[in-house]
Image (cartoon, helix red, strand yellow):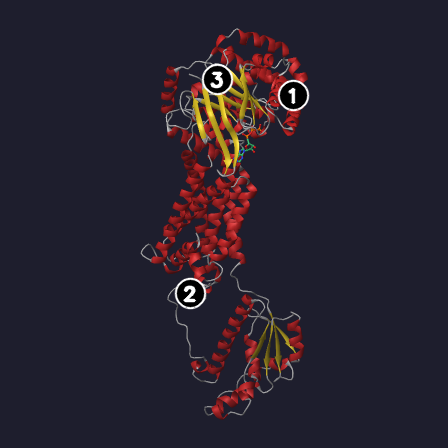
């Protein structure tokens, strides 16, 4: 049995109707105890083929057999500890030290600490690794590649897959690695598949596959290929093959490029040529190796390893993953600071900036019943005391003006209405209050004569207010304040005249509120929505960033090849992220309650649980984005593109009742709308699970969690 067999391998990307064929009925055979050099121009499908072999991608048609099983099938051990995979990217956690990296991989492969220690020592010497305490992120490119190589080798796999392992390494180290591979494959059943841009380097392999446009043009030992094409170099043989198979000019030029790269290191290759000769001799003396593509299987060995694989418990792997996630988080002080302080910072900004009463608004005052405003400072302006049930009024406009204090507006006095109006037009004041010449007289006339009052009295007794209404919030505030001022003014006037106070009020009275407070502030209305959007989108951004980074850096694939299932990977992330969310939710609730005095008439637990669930759905939304977006830019577009419509439509800034009915229904389906209402009802009304709005908030969040979970699982499946 061969180590790897691919038969009629067919794989495409994109849609079935318009497929981009990457593997085209490809056949490949790799024997045990041999090195297989997979060569081909960039983009010909090498990485895709390797991904299918290690079981992180699947063929659309054809068959792959790896170590006697089908990759991805239960019990095959692939992906898993039977395979060692070094991807093209570094694919290592930069926050780990070198030693921690090797130990981490050893643990997820289920090795004992003693065995990991032994292997680490050996690989450290072989690969000349830097000191174990050095952080991977602080290593040079070449050092990182060596650590990556060690991580792929630590568990002594049966099949080693190396995607361009020697890029960026100095010739001596390349030689050392090849020596090691040749020696190990000669003395064990290890099968190695290696891709390289240094074509001549592949002469040391037992078998070479020359790949172009998704097919293998040739698969033979280097010696046979060279003699068959009467070529002195593999590059030349490859060129001949491409010409024979009708290569286009474009591919020709690409091959020229490869040739140039190889030539640039020709000097290096010459330095190792003597060793190569030695190695060839050793290869030739090894029967099994020279028997290219016809290797033998070892069923007993496979069974033993399958059992070994089964012994690796999920618990061990989960522990390794969780330790990795938490260490990774803790070793990024800037990230930790952001996660801890950003919600506090945002909440402080929100409470300080939003909901406060506007101050310093300017209001123009024009009073035609006064010769000069200094007349108002005369204490005799106060209403004369009542005689015989009458109450003589005097310059009542001064009374009203004195009630307008700085908390309402800053008064600007004008001599004429025109002058004040011009200033209002120029934006110097927000409005003008005008009192007619015989304002007090007209008031008295109406009081005394009622319906017999002189013509024009009703007009003249009116306090005329002209407002710049271009800013709705300020207008709303000023109107409210002026109405309050009027109430204070009229009540005082009635009191002074010994009239019933209520006689001056309009006959509508707002009594003690059923819920909320008389002075309810806007902040209380939007706070739940703001907090929810914050928790949701923080979880979305963190999750999508982590997963896209892991995928782009190859960490995702490498972890899967190590045998960790997608479920375990997600579970570890959920646990890590949930602990962060719990911390954020608690700090937000405490801050809102104790520093900003937000009253909660309900149960803190009901609020925190709903926030956590919402954060959880935000996390799943982040995962959904990371599955369908190939880059951070796309993910940012998608997150930002959905953020704005969601917060505008969810009713946190404006009551839903102000929307068209059809939009209200759409809004109810969004993740924040019903939960915001629920939290508002918990905080202000003290409602709990027996109330419909709270149940609705929890229900829609649960529905979102289930829908996003299903979409993510489908996405993960179709993206394979
Ligand atoms: N997920 C994907 N979706 C669509 N196209 C893809 C995807 N992955 C790879 N491809 C395309 O498939 C082709 C083969 O890619 P692959 O990475 O397998 O090539 P390669 O031979 O390994 O190249 P290189 O040597 O540059 O790494 C390329 O044209 C690539 O753009």
Q: Residues within 10 Å of mark 3 (few under 14, many from 20)?
A: many
Label ID, residue 191: 3
Q: Which residue is mark 1?
A: 262
Please report the residue visible at 63 percent of the width from the left and 80 percent of the height from the top: 373
Nearer to the camera, 579 or 77: 77
Please report the residue visible at 55 percent of the width from the left and 85 percent of the height from the top: 459
Visible in this render: residue 96?
Answer: no
| Helix, strand or loop under label 1 | helix
Image quarter of the N terminus: top left
Please report the residue visible at 43 percent of the width from the left and 19 percent of the height from the top: 114
Q: Is residue 608 left or right of residue 282?
A: left
| Helix, strand or loop under label 2 | loop
Label ID, residue 517: 2
Q: Is the CB of mark 2 within 8 Å of ligand 1?
A: no
Mark earlier in primary sequence (1, 3): 3
Picture coordinates of residue 720, whole percent (x, y): 46, 34
Looking at the image, is 455 positioned above or below residue 43? below
Please report the residue visible at 54 percent of the width from the left and 21 percent of the height from the top: 194
Cα distance between the residues tagged 2 and 1: 79 Å
Nearer to the camera, 444 or 93: 93
Nearer to the camera, 280 or 416: 280
Closest to the camera, between mark 2 and mark 1, is: 1
Picture coordinates of residue 597, whole percent (x, y): 45, 57
Looking at the image, is 85 positioned above or below residue 452? above
């Amino acid at each position: 049995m061969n180590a790897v067999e691919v038969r009629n391998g067919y794989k495409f990307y994109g849609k079935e109707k318009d497929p981009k064929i990457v593997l085209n009925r490809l056949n490949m055979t790799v024997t045990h105890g041999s090195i297989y050099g997979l060569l081909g121009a960039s983009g010909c499908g090498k990485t895709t083929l390797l991904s299918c072999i290690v079981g992180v991608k699947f063929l659309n048609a054809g068959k792959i057999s790896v170590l006697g099983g089908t990759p991805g099938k239960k019990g095959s051990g692939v992906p898993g500890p039977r395979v060692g995979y070094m991807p093209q990217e570094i694919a290592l956690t930069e926050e780990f030290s070198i030693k921690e990296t090797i130990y981490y991989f050893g643990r997820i492969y289920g090795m004992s600490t003693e065995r990991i220690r032994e292997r680490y020592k050996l690989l450290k010497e072989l690969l000349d690794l830097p000191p174990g305490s050095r952080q991977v992120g602080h290593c040079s490119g070449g050092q990182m590649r060596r650590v990556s190589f060690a991580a792929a080798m630590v568990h002594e796999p049966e099949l080693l897959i190396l995607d361009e392992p020697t890029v960026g390494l100095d010739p001596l180290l390349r030689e050392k690695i090849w020596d090691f591979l040749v020696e190990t494959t000669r003395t064990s059943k290890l099968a190695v598949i290696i891709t390289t841009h240094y074509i001549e380097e592949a002469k040391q392999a037992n078998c070479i596959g020359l790949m172009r446009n998704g097919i293998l043009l040739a698969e033979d030992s280097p010696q046979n290929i060279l003699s068959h094409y009467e070529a002195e170099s593999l590059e030349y043989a490859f060129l001949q093959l491409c010409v024979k198979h009708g290569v286009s000019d474009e591919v020709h030029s690409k091959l020229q490029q490869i040739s140039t790269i190889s030539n640039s290191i020709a000097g290096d290759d010459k330095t190792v040529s003597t060793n190569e000769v030695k190695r060839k001799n050793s290869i030739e003396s090894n029967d099994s190796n020279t028997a290219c593509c016809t290797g033998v299987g070892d069923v007993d060995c496979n069974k033993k390893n399958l059992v070994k694989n089964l012994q690796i418990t999920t618990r061990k792997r989960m522990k390794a993953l969780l330790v990795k996630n938490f260490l990774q988080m803790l070793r990024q002080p800037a990230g930790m600071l952001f996660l801890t302080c950003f919600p506090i910072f945002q909440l402080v900004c929100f409470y300080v900036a939003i909901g406060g009463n506007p101050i310093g608004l300017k209001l123009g005052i024009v009073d035609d019943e006064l010769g000069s405003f200094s007349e108002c400072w005369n204490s005799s302006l106060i209403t004369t005391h009542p005689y015989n049930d009458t109450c003589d009024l005097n310059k009542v406009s001064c009374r009203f003006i004195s009630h307008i204090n700085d908390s309402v507006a800053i008064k600007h006095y004008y001599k004429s209405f025109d002058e004040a109006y011009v200033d209002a037009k120029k934006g110097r004041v927000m409005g003008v209050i005008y009192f007619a010449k015989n304002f007090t007289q007209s008031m008295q006339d109406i009081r005394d004569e009622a319906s017999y009052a002189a013509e024009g009295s009703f007009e003249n007794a009116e306090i005329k207010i002209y407002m710049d209404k271009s800013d709705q919030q300020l207008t709303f505030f000023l109107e409210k304040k002026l109405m309050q001022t009027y109430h204070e003014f009229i009540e005082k006037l009635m009191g002074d005249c010994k009239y019933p106070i209520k006689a001056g009020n309009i006959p509508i009275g707002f009594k003690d509120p059923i819920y909320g407070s008389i002075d309810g502030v806007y902040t209380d209305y939007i706070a739940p929505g703001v907090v929810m959007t914050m928790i949701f989108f923080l979880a979305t951004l963190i999750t999508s960033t982590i997963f896209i980074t892991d995928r782009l850096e190859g960490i995702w694939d490498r972890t899967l090849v190590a045998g960790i299932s997608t479920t375990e990977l997600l579970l570890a992330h959920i646990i890590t992220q949930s602990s962060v969310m719990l911390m954020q939710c608690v700090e937000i609730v405490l801050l809102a309650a104790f520093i900003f005095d937000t009253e909660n008439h309900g149960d803190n637990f009901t609020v925190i649980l709903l926030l956590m669930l919402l954060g959880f759905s935000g996390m799943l939304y982040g995962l959904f984005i990371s599955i369908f977006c190939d880059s951070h830019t796309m993910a940012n577009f998608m997150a930002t593109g959905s953020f704005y419509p969601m917060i505008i439509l969810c009713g946190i800034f404006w009551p839903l009742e102000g929307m068209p009915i059809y939009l209200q229904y759409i809004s109810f389906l969004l993740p924040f709308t019903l939960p915001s209402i629920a939290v508002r009802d918990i905080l202000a009304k003290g409602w709990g699970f027996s109330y419909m709005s709270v149940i609705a908030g929890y229900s829609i969040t649960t529905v979102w969690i289930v829908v996003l979970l299903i979409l993510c699982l489908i996405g993960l499946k179709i993206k394979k």
